Image (cartoon, rainbow, N blue to C red):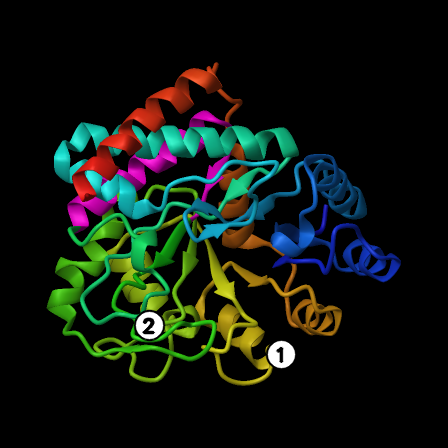
């Protein structure tokens, strides 16, 4: 079955006739949901069914950013609030086992929410390592400032998601922690020396290189490529992401509609594929832009198709799970973190 190498958002809580026609004609590999797409559990499940029916693929991936903290597309009154990543870091500093347990439990509970809706992929974990003076766009989403600690917590988050039948997406490779601007608004440039990047930022991603999918960072690393952000830099993808870090899974861009990227949507899409990304991600649900992305997107084939197939094949059925017991254990751990931060 022909699939195109892009992931698309949609405008609202149900498909319009023109969106349905677009999806049926262009056949994106997957879809991504945002708050604008969410009203209630029943509505979200019906929208997901519509999306998959439009491409006639029951296994079409449906993604969401459900991290906890500031980044939750699903929230009250139908879904609980989950802790930000920094909470796991504080617990880890008290006792590593506390932090790892809380991270796994939170992710397992999130996975339970997503699985019930039909969502199959969560854009989590983060392996970004923040530094003093960086933009707050990462901030308390990060697990800490030590690469080994970040990688350990990210692995625990991955375990929780996978145990719940949800595929993880590692982000934002090769690192967003030093960015001094919000990539939704402008392009950040990191002038840190290569040796320091290898020791810190990239070091947090290496232990996670076996994850099935990853999302790029719209960040310039001048030590490697002073002109292009990682998303559109063949040097960064070949030398750092595939090389130094060793990631061999399915690589998707961050959202091409973000203002960090230069040029038209057409030019951005071309640049994403020219650099070596397997998939382009477009999120805002604007149909004119969606058409432009689709017009520049090739059929998913070759190595990219093999990586996509391996990623989907790695998804497992959820393990047995006691939600009440998991919440009780997580609440007790969060209380410890609150006491420690007081």
Task: Tell which tag, 1 or 2, sits nearer the viewer.
Answer: 1
Q: Is residue 164 magenta?
A: yes
Magenta part of the protein: which range? 147-169
Classify mark 2: residues with Cα within 10 Å, few (<14), some (14-19) or many (20+): some
**Majority secondary structure of magenta residues:** helix
Q: Give SS at disc 1.
A: helix
x then y, percent, for residue 297: 64, 66
x then y, percent, for residue 74: 57, 44
Residue 99, relative to residue 131: is it above or below? above
Position of the N terminus by quadrant? top right
For the residues marked 1 and 2, what is the alpha-carbon distance in whole angstroms? Answer: 21 Å
Q: Name the residue tied to disc 2.
A: 235
x then y, percent, for residue 301: 59, 54
- Taking 226 as reference, is 95 left or right? left
- Residue depicted at x 35% and y 58%: 173
- Residue depicted at x 30% and y 33%: 334
Q: Name the residue tied to disc 1.
A: 266
Residue 119, relative to residue 324: is it above or below? below
């Amino acid at each position: 079955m022909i699939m195109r190498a892009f992931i698309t958002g949609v405008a609202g809580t149900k498909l319009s006739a023109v969106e349905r026609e677009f999806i049926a004609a262009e056949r994106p590999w997957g879809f991504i949901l945002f708050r604008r797409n969410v009203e209630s559990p029943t509505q979200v499940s019906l929208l997901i069914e519509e999306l998959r029916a439009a491409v006639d693929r029951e296994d079409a991936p449906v993604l969401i950013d459900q991290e906890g903290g500031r980044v939750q597309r699903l929230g009250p009154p139908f879904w609980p609030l989950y802790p930000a990543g920094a909470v796991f870091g504080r617990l880890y500093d008290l006792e590593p086992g506390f932090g790892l347990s809380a991270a796994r439990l939170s992710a397992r509970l999130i996975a339970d929410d997503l699985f019930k809706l039909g969502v199959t992929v969560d854009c989590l974990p983060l392996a970004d390592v923040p530094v003093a003076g960086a933009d707050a766009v990462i901030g308390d989403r990060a697990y800490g400032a030590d690469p080994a600690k970040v990688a350990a917590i990210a692995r625990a988050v991955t375990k929780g998601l996978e145990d719940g039948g949800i595929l993880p997406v590692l982000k934002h490779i090769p690192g967003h922690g030093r960015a001094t601007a919000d990539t939704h608004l402008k392009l950040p440039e990191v002038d840190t020396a290569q040796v320091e990047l290898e020791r810190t930022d990239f070091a947090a991603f290496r232990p996670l290189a076996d994850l099935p999918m990853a999302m790029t960072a719209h960040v310039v690393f001048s030590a490697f490529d002073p002109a292009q952000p990682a998303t559109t830099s063949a040097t960064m993808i070949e030398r750092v992401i595939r090389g130094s870090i060793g990631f061999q899974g399915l690589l998707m861009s961050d959202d091409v509609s973000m203002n960090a990227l230069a040029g038209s949507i057409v030019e951005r899409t071309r640049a994403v594929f020219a650099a070596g990304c397997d998939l382009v991600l477009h999120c805002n649900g604007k149909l004119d832009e969606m058409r432009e992305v689709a017009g520049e997107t090739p059929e998913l084939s070759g190595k990219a198709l093999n990586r996509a197939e391996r990623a989907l094949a790695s998804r497992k059925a959820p393990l047995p799970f006691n939600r009440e017991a998991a919440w009780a254990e997580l609440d007790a751990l969060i209380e410890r973190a609150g006491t420690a931060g007081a």
